[in-house]
Image (spheres, coloured by chain):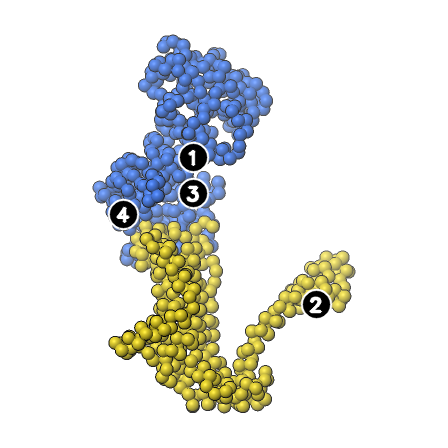
Amino acid sequence: MTQMDPVDNALLFDLAKDELPEEDQAAVVRLGSSKGSWFKQVGWRHLVGIVALFFAIFPILFLVSAAFNPLGTLSSSTLIPNGASFDNFRKLFNNTDFWKWLLNSILIAFVSSFLSIFISALASFALSRFRFKGRRAGLLAILLIQMFPQFLAVVAIYLMFTAISRLYPSLGFNTPWALVILYLGGAMGGSVWLIKGFFDTVPKDLDESAKVDGATHVQIYFGIILPLVTPILAVTGLLAFIGAMNEIVFASVFLTDSSSKTAAIGLYGLVSGERNNNFGVFAAGSLITAIPIVLLFQYLQRYIVGGLTAGAVKG
Amino acid sequence: MASVTFDRINKMYDNGFHAVRDLSLNVADGEFLVLVGPSGCGKTTALRMVAGLEDISTGTMKIGDRVVNTLGPKDRDIAMVFQSYALYPHMTVGDNISYGLRIRKMDKSEIARRVKKAADMLELTPLLDRKPKQLSGGQRQRVAMGRAIVREPQVFLMDEPLSNLDAKLRVQMRAEISQVQQDLNVTTLYVTHDQIEAMTMGDRVAVLKAGVLQQLGAPQFLYDNPDNIFVAGFIGSPPMNMGLGTLGGTAEAMTLQLGSSTLPLAPELIAEKPALRTRIGSEVVVGLRSEDMEDASIRRGSDSAAVLDAEVVLTEALGSEIVVHFETDIRKLVNEDTKLLAEESGEAELGPVGHGVTKWVASFAPRSRVKPRDHVKVVVDTERLHFFDLDTTKAVYR
C-alpha cells in the first residue's frame, strides 16, 4: 500500500487517498518507478486474467466470426469477419433437419440428465444413509466400471439394442429413448460418487430428528435432505446435460436416420464428409446449440451456493 | 403422559460391543430422570433405544402400557432434543417447530395454536420467521425445545442438550428446561455426562458405568449414600476424597488408621453401619466429602481427636468458602474406578504431578487463613465418613 500512486489507487482498489498515513503520502512515488512492486502485488493478476479471458473468448469469437462469414470456409474466416451475413443460418435451416436435431438433443439431454440425477440421488441417499451388505463393494464397482472407456462397450450394446429394436422398436435404434436409457447407465457412476459425498456432509442427526418427528424415509428424503443438496444436484445435472448434448460415439452408432439425429452428430455430418465446405453452417449450428446450455446454466446458477446446512447443528 | 420402563434391556452391537447390560429402571409418569455417566457408558444408547433409533437386542421396553420394542420412532409418541439441535436449516423457526405436526397432517388452526403457545413459552415469537443460521446457540437450543414441546408427546428425550452452550448460558438453560418440564409435567429422560446437570435437574438420577446401572436415586441421596466407589467419585464437585485406611480398636470404641493419624470413630457411625465391626483389623477404602472437614484452628467448641495432618498445596478462595488442596500421608487408592474418573475429568492427561502422593480437597470456612505450604490440622467429621470394600468397591453398610 505504501508504494502506490494515489492517482492510480482508484483504478486498483477503492483505497481513498486520505486513508494513507501522512508519511506514506509523502513517500509515494510515480507508478513508473515502482513498476516491479506494483506488478508483484496486482499486475500479475491482471495478466493471468487477460490470458484466461483470451483463452476462453478466442474460440467463441472465432465461432461467431465463422458463423457470420458469408464465404463459409475456415480459411477465409478471420476474427473480424469481412462482411457479415446470415447466409450460413439460412443454409442450415433450409438444407438440413437442424431444428429436429436440436429438438432431439434437448429432449435426450433433458430427460436423461433429469432421470440420471433422480436415480443417482436415490442411490446416493441409500449409500450414504443405510448400512447394508454389499454397500462398499457396490460403491467400488460403480467407480471401477466408470474407469473403462465408454466405447469398449459399443459392440456389446449395439448387439443388445439390435435385439431390443426387433422386439420393441420404440426403444430401439433411431429413437431418442434408446439413447436416454444408455446415458442413464453411463451417467450414474460419476454422479453417485459426487452426490453421495455431498449427502455425507448433511448431518445424520437431521434424519433422526425428522424420524422422531414422524417423517417416513420418503418424507425425509424429499422434505429434508434434497433441499439441502441442491447445489450438487444442479452441478451434476448440468454436467450430465452437457455430456448428453455433446455425446457423439453412441449417438452416431444409434441414430442414423437424418430426422432422428442429435445436433452433435447432425452437425458433425456437415463437416466430416466433404472438406471444410460446410464449416460456416457448422459454426452457425454450434452457436445455436450452445444457447440451451447457457440458458440452463443461468437458471441453475442460483442453486449453486454454499452453506445450505449452516445452522443445522452446532458448528 | 406415561411412564417408561426398561426391563432387562441389553444392547449388543454387531462388532460385539456390549453397550448396555441388563438395564432395568422405571421412569415414573411426569418424572425427570437423568441418565449420567462418563462418555461411552451407554447412556445415549439407552436413550436412543427409547426413541426407537437403536434396536433393542434383548429385554422389554415399555412406554405407558405399550411394549414399544418393534415400534418405529414415529409411533412411540416421543419427542427428542438432540445434542446438536438438528434443526432443519432450510426451514424457518416456525416451520421447524411445526414440522412434526404438519407431517402428521394436523389441523392448520391447531398447529398455529400450538406453535404460538410454544413460542410464547420459550420467547421465540419474534424469531419465528428466521432461519436457524441467523440464531445464536441458545436460541437454536430453544427452537429444538420448541419442536419437542409442540408435539405434546408422552415422553421427552434429551440427549446432552446443553453441552454445546457456553457455561453461563448452560446455567440459564438448565433452569429453563427444568421450568418447562415442571410446567408441562411430561415424563423426561435426560442424558448428560455432567454430574452438576444431573444433580440440579433430576428428580432422580441413574448413574451408569460401562453399560451397567450403578445406582438410582434422588440426587441428594446419591450424594449422601453412594453405593460404590464409582458413584462416590462421580457425583459431587469437588469429587469425594478417597484413600486407604485400616479399621482398628474394639467393637465399642473403633478407630480408623488413616496414614499416620488415628481417628476415633463416632458411635453414631458404628450404629448406622454395624458392618464395620466385622472388619476390625482389615483395610477399607475411606471416602470423605470436602465439606466434612474443617480447619482445626478456627473450630469452636470441644477439641476433636479426629485430626489429620496436612500440608496445603493450593487454596482457592470462593468467598463463601475456601477450597484447600492438601497433601497427606494417607495411602492412595488406585483402581479401575479412580482411573476412569481421572480420565473423565481430564486429570489423567495432565500427567503425574505429585504422583503417588494422596491429595485431598477440603472446603474451609472463609475465616480460615491457611496459605499454600502451611502445615495445618484438619478436623474430620467422622460421622460423615464413607467406607467401601476394597475388592467389591461396594459401600459398607450393615
Q: Which residue is rendered at x = 43% and y = 27% of the image?
A: B335
Front residue of this view, candidates A17 and A209 = A209
Tag shown at residue B162: 3
Residue B138 in the image: state x and y as whole percent.
45, 47
Q: Residues within 10 Å of mark 4 (few under 14, many from 20)?
A: many
Q: Colour of chain B?
A: blue
Residue type, numbered disc 4:
Arg
Q: For mark 4, what is the residue?
A: B76
Disc on res. A8: 2
Give the distance between the C-alpha atoms of the residues marked 1 and 4, in whole angstroms: 30 Å
Q: Kindly report the distance in space between the C-alpha atoms of the residues bearing marks 4 and 3.
A: 24 Å
Q: Position of residue B108 (x, y in %)?
A: 30, 58
Q: CA distance from mark 2 to mark 4?
A: 70 Å
Q: How many marks?
A: 4
Please determine if labels 1 and 3 lie on a single subunit.
yes
Q: CA distance from mark 3 to mark 2?
A: 55 Å
Count neighbours of disc 3 (C-alpha within 10 A) and say few if under 14, some if 14 to 19, many if 20 or more.
many
Q: Quadrant of residue A148 in the image?
A: bottom left
Q: Is B218 rendered above or below residue A16? A: above
Callout 1: 10 Å neighbours few (<14), some, many (20+)?
some
Give the structural element (helix, strand or loop) at label 4: loop
Between A20 and B54, the residue placed more toward the observer is B54
Subunit of mark 3? B
Callouts 4 and 3 in the same chain: yes
User: What residue does disc 1 label?
Assistant: B196
